[in-house]
Each structure stands twice: as structure tokens, then as C-alpha cells.
Amino acid sequence: MQKKAILDLDTGIDDALALAYALGSPELEVIGVTTTYGNVLLETGAANDLALLELFGAPEVPVYLGEPHAQTKDGFEVLEISAFIHGQNGIGEVELAKAAAAAQPGAVDFLISSVKEHGDDLVIIATGPMTNLSAAIAKDETFADNAHIVIMGGALTVPGNVSPWAEANINQDPDAANDLFRSGAEVTMIGLDVTLQTLLTKKHTAQWRELGTPAAIALADMTDYYIKAYDTTAPHLGGCGLHDPLAVGVAVDPSLVTLLPINLKVDVEGETRGRTIGDEVRLNDQVRTSRAAVAVDVDRFLNEFMTRIGRVAAAN
Ligand code: BDR
Ligand code: CA
């Protein structure tokens, strides 16, 4: 059966790829995009989402504005490293036509009402900071018990990417991610453990370029920018990490990864602030509300990725 999906994005090049993956997946019906800050400011991310939805032939998908910064902070500024990896505009300095549609306020309310309305038929895929999800949990006491969430974030068996402990999405708002893990919501964590194994190279993007459509060229251009940044920041990898698309891939087909049932928490104090780790307080609980991906079928995922992105790229 087709599942309804909401993408909570801080768009971002790999968020853009995640959006294309979702739209290219017949198993998912994207009912909305909620926006968060992170790779870019909230408004920039929303503008990117709107422009990408139009480029990908889905201008009817609504975009909702979320929280502009962590609740524990007064504001948000894009980190230098984020701008280096994703470009100042978040999409590798690729210029897209401004969308005709506008974003609406109310991401948190949209998340809450969608979980109420669709329950088990809905998956929320969050690929930025967890601030909107934490706000939904705080605002509606039934949200956590009924939500099914796949996140890109965290690092359980490998070091972080912004500090030795912390992965970028968790690092933006460790308190929110901790709220999420401890809320009892069903959370599947797709962290650096697996996303740094799924790598894309210019050989792949050249296949899109050959398609010659506006969507294919834009996707190839922004992803080449991302690959170039990875060549500088992580030359040992030999490609760019497909972080956010893998979260969508697992929402479609969980068998792409090996999932470890574990009650997770995030360190919110001291120098390990932002670390995702097992919650010692719930170590012996029979119920494990979260699952962390610890292995991935790389070849199968890359194949799915190229097929699904290729579908959107070829048609638009
Ligand atoms: C995550 O951080 C962001 O920069 C990416 O879009 C991805 O969601 C990787 O750590
Ligand atoms: Ca992201």
C-alpha cells in the first residue's frame, strides 16, 4: 500500500536529493514538506523546497514553515562548514526559477494534524535538526505515541562530522533530538554509521547530465558541487555521502539496512553534547522505541537511488 510521507528538510543538496528520491518513489505519496533551519536559514530552505518541487513536477505539494532556530537559542546563523558544503544558497549555487507557490506558516500544526489523521499510514522523514518534531511532541500529547519517524542524524558506531561526537543535524539542537528519542515515538535513526558508506561520484551524476532535462542538469550541477566539497573535507571517501536520501530509502524499504533495536538518548551536557548513544536508564526496558541502522546494502541502495532520481530527472 502507498504510504503518505512528510519530509522535514533543511534544504541542502542532499535534502534536495531526498526530495527527488521521495517523489520518484511510487510507494510514497508526499503530502507536504515542513521546513527547518540548518544547512541554510529557514526561509532559504523553504524557497529551495518550493523551487525544487516545481522543478520536479510536484508544485501542488504544500510547504510549511517550521521553527527558525533551536528553542534553547535566540537565533540561528549558518555555519561556515555548511555554506562550504552546500553553497550559500544551499543548492550548490545552482540558480532555480522562483516558484509561483508560497510557503505557509504552521509546520508543527501540520505535523500534528497529519499524525492524527493518517496514523500508521504516515511516515515522517526528518533530515535536518529535530526542532519541529520536538515542538510537536511538546504541543500535542498524542503525537509521540502515534508518529512513525525516520531521521537522518546521529552517529552510534563512528565519530561525528562536526565534532568527534556529534553529527550535524543532532548538533544543531541536541535537546530537541534528545526529546524525540526519549518521547517514546517510533524512531528509526539513519546515522553516519551507514550514510558514509553510500557514496556518489561524478560518474553517477554524468548519467543525469546525459538525460539533458532541466531537472537532470540542476541535480547534476548541485551534486557535483557537493562532491567537490567532499573531495576537500573527506578525500578518503572518494565521493559524497548520501545522508538524507538514505533516510527516504529506508522509509520505503527498511530491508536496505540492518536495524539495531535500542533506546537512544542524546548527551546534552558537557563536552560530548550532541552525542547519540544508548540510554542507560532504559537499557533494560523490554520495549525499544528506536532502532539505529548499523549496516547497509550499499549496492542495492545505490541502484534504487539512481533508478528513483533518474525517474524524476528524466521526466522533468
Ligand atoms: C546531515 O547534515 C546536513 O548537512 C545534511 O543535509 C545531512 O542532513 C549530515 O550530517
Ligand atoms: Ca539535511
Image (cartoon, grey):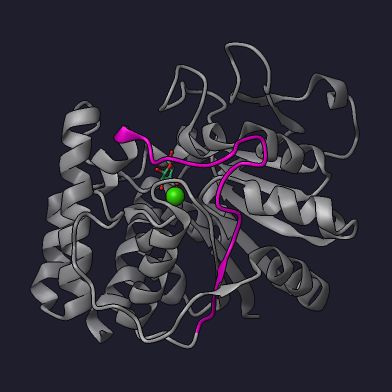
> Is residue 211 or residue 47 the one in the foreground?
47
- Which x, y percent locates residue 295? 50, 37
Residue at 77% from the left image edge and 73% from the top image edge: 113
Quarter holding the N terminus? bottom right
**Was residue 174 drawn as part of the magenta stretch in this picture?**
no
Q: Position of residue 240 (x, y in %)?
A: 26, 43
> Where does the magenta region start and end?
61-80
Residue 296, percent from left and from top: 47, 43
Asked if residue 18 shows in the view, the reply is: no
Determine the main secondary structure of the stretch shown in magenta.
loop
- In the image, residue 79 lies in the stretch drawn in magenta: yes
In the visual, does 263 lie left or right of 42? right
Q: Is residue 72 visible?
A: yes
In the image, what residue occupies the spot 22% across and 54% down?
Answer: 92
Q: Residue at x 49, y 41 (%)?
A: 76
Q: Residue 231, image x and y in percent?
A: 16, 34
Please, is residue 148 above or below residue 77 in the view?
A: below
Q: Quadrant of ligand 1?
A: top left
Near-viewer residue (236 or 257):
236
